[in-house]
Image (tube, rainbow, N blue to C red):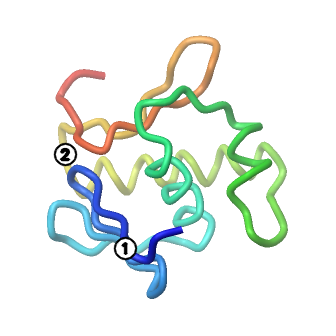
């Protein structure tokens, strides 16, 4: 995995575990960081919660209900940092698709 990931509005330094969105540093929990890194490494792909749970955690993966809490918290932080942009989108019957360059559409 690369140490710095630059994708759209995001710059993630994996080594220092920092995330910048549109030039502003985001405060993310360890779990939120892990989910975001996984999603940003798979842009525009449809991703299920089970896929993220099975592949993104280096330590103890959370239960699915805990994962959903983490995902909702991450979405809220992204929405607060970049109002009107939608980076995480829920897709019918699949779950999530990450867009590194957000649009104003949901």
Residue tagged by mark 1? Answer: 4
Coordinates of residue 71 in the picture (x, y in percent): 57, 48
Of badges 2 and 1, nearer the viewer stands 1
Coordinates of residue 54 in the picture (x, y in percent): 79, 48
Q: Nearer the viewer, residue 33 or 79?
A: 33
- Which type of secondary structure does the marked residue at label 1 adopt? strand
> Above or below — where is 79 with respect to 61?
above
Residue 40 got which mark?
Answer: none
Q: Mark 1, residues whose alpha carbon is within 10 Å: few (<14), some, or many (≥20)?
A: some
Of mark 2 and mark 1, the one earlier in the sequence is: 1
Tell me which corner region of the image, top left, top right, bottom left or bottom right, holds residue 81: bottom left
> Above or below — where is 78 with respect to 100?
below
Q: Mark 2, residues whose alpha carbon is within 10 Å: few (<14), some, or many (≥20)?
A: few
Q: Which residue is located at x 53 percent, y 30 percent?
A: 96
Alpha carbons under labels 2 and 1: distance apart:
25 Å
Q: Indicate left or right for 78 with 33 as reference.
A: left
Q: Residue furthest bottom?
A: 16
Q: Residue furthest top?
A: 92
Q: Indicate left or right for 67 with 87 as reference.
A: right
Coordinates of residue 65 in the picture (x, y in percent): 77, 44
Q: Which residue is located at x 73 percent, y 63 percent?
A: 57
Q: Indicate left or right for 21 with 66 as reference.
A: left
Q: Which residue is located at x 70 percent, y 49 percent?
A: 67
Residue tagged by mark 2? Answer: 83
> Above or below — where is 93 with respect to 83?
above
> Above or below — where is 36 with respect to 44?
below
Q: Which residue is located at x 60 percent, y 32 percent?
A: 47
Q: Residue furthest front?
A: 2
- Which type of secondary structure does the marked residue at label 2 adopt? loop
**Which quadrant holds the N terminus?**
bottom right
């Amino acid at each position: 995995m690369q140490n710095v990931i630059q994708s759209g509005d995001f710059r993630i330094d994996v080594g220092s575990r920092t995330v910048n969105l549109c030039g502003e540093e985001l405060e993310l929990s360890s779990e939120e960081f892990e989910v975001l890194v996984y999603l940003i490494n798979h842009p525009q792909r449809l991703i299920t919660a089970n896929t993220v749970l099975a592949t993104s955690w280096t330590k103890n993966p959370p239960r699915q209900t805990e994962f959903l809490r983490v995902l909702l918290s991450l979405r809220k932080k992204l929405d607060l940092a970049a109002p009107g942009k939608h980076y995480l989108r829920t897709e019918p019957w699949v779950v999530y698709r990450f867009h590194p360059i957000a649009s104003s559409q949901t």
